[in-house]
Image (tube, rainbow, N blue to C red):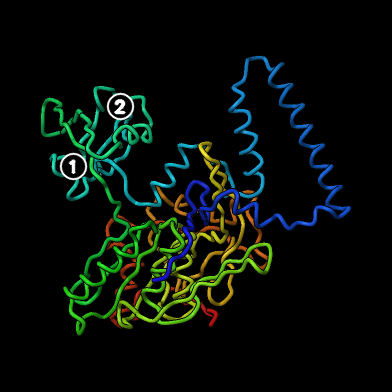
Amino acid sequence: MRKIPMILLSALAGAGATTLVSQTNLLSSTSAVALSSTSAVAASAETYRQLSLFGDVFEKVRSDYVERPDEAKLIESAINGMLTSLDPHSSYMDPKNFRDMQVQTRGEFGGLGIEVTMEEGLVKVVTPIDETPAARAGLLANDVITHIDDEQVQGLTLNQAVDKMRGPVNSTVRLKIKRKERSEPFEVSLTRDTIRIRPVRARKEGDDIGVLRITQFNEQTFEGLKSAIDRLSAEIGADKLKGYVIDLRNNPGGLLDQAIMVSDAFLERGEIVSTRGRNADETQRYNAKAGDLTKGKPLVVLINGGSASASEIVAGALQDHKRATVLGTRSFGKGSVQTIIPLGGNGAVRLTTARYYTPAGRSIQAKGIDPDTEILQEIPDELKGKDETKGEAGLRGHLKNDKEEKGGSSAYVPPDPSKDKQLGAAYDHLRGITNRASVTPRTGVPN
């Protein structure tokens, strides 16, 4: 598997397709601009006049505002305002946000190994992750964490509480736990370890289908997928195995190289994705290499309104090559590429620099991927009208698509798999059953 530059594609928190480069490299690519031309000189003079105006306004705020402003925050806000005025995915990341993004893309960190949520101002354990300090210490789902190192959790945000539980490997942290079955809170001391986020969860359905749930595209995704396919193939047996369901619903994206490798895992040849910048010579194409990990077994890909960026690359590649049947609802429509420019110890700039296209040349920007067959879930009454995402087309200032744009679609997935119509339809498709209701075929899928 060839090396691909680190590019992150995500619809979370405005993060788009991202490649880590140095500021020097980025500037060297623009050094050939003909600044000696009359129009360039005039534009430059106007630019410097505007920068002088900014300096005048900054000085007025600094000297005359009713309260003494934080000057560093003024500059940071000005930088972020400039970037966010471009599109929803360009922004400034302060040093902490930059570090958090790097941790997310690595998929591992020093921590305890618990999935948590906030409930009534306290941190509640959703589940401990197997073979982690939390699991070894006996923490259970629904345990409530009231104190971290003797500091009350009440009053902290969820992110603040999580930051306090994370830390260097082999360091210790004390948690005070309240559990329904015990009358008194109790304290546990845990030693932090390297926690790896599991981006791929695999299981078999009956004795003939493998289900591969991909939750994000971090550095662990392809290896997790490969291991899952090997395990399911051995458990079910090649003769019995009818195919795989690849569940990408509500997957916000991640690393481009992982999206390419996941697509390549199911393809023998052909283009997977291309990225195109402002200039024609910036176009890059990524192609599949021979070797299908599933040995040609049928595939069904599930997408919905929460499937974005890297997820859309995988779904689009497999759909265009007619390697998989895509079921569900239209995807998010995040089709732009952002370059991350580190600023030394001052964080980083995230700047939109390209769009990406499926093998058939489709831009999914502000449009998304339409499934081959649309399957709508039964939405609970209390969630009706709240189950749809805005989609990229619903974001203010988004990059326009030259062709038709489409809004968001349903992102609801029932917590009970037996009520999941999309998942059920995927099983039926692989087993050759065609009588499931609430299914709308789509025509005109590009070759």
In this view of the protein, which residue sits in the foreground, 392 or 286?
286
Residue 256 numbered tag = none
In this view of the protein, which residue sits in the foreground, 443 or 33?
33
Give the residue at the far right of this rendering.
38
Residue at numbered disc 1: 133
Give coordinates of residue 222: x percent, y percent. Answer: 34, 65
Which residue does the image show at 33% across and 80% down from the upper left? Answer: 298
Give coordinates of residue 5: x percent, y percent. Answer: 48, 61
Looking at the picture, does residue 68 appear above or below residue 436? above
Which residue does the image show at 37% across and 32% down from the upper left? Answer: 160
Residue at numbered disc 2: 153
Which residue does the image show at 30% across and 27% down from the upper left? Answer: 153
Look at label 1 and name its amino acid: Pro
Locate the N terminus by quadrant: bottom left
Give coordinates of residue 100: x percent, y percent. Answer: 42, 42
In this view of the protein, which residue sits in the foreground, 132 or 314?
132
- Determine the secondary structure under disc 1: helix
Give coordinates of residue 136: x percent, y percent. Answer: 13, 43
Q: Earlier in the sequence, mark 1 or mark 2?
A: 1
Q: Which quarter of the picture shows residue 433?
A: bottom left
In this view of the protein, which residue sits in the foreground, 343 or 215?
343
Crowding at dot 2, Cα within 10 Å, few <14 / some 14-19 / many 20+, comes out as many
Q: Which quarter of the picture shows residue 336?
A: bottom right
Look at label 2 and name its amino acid: Val
Crowding at dot 1, Cα within 10 Å, few <14 / some 14-19 / many 20+, comes out as many
Q: Is residue 192 left or right of residue 396?
A: left
Q: Is residue 228 left or right of residue 314?
A: left
Looking at the picture, does residue 383 appear above or below residue 1? above
Q: Which of label 1 and label 2 is nearer to you?
A: 1
- Determine the secondary structure under disc 2: loop
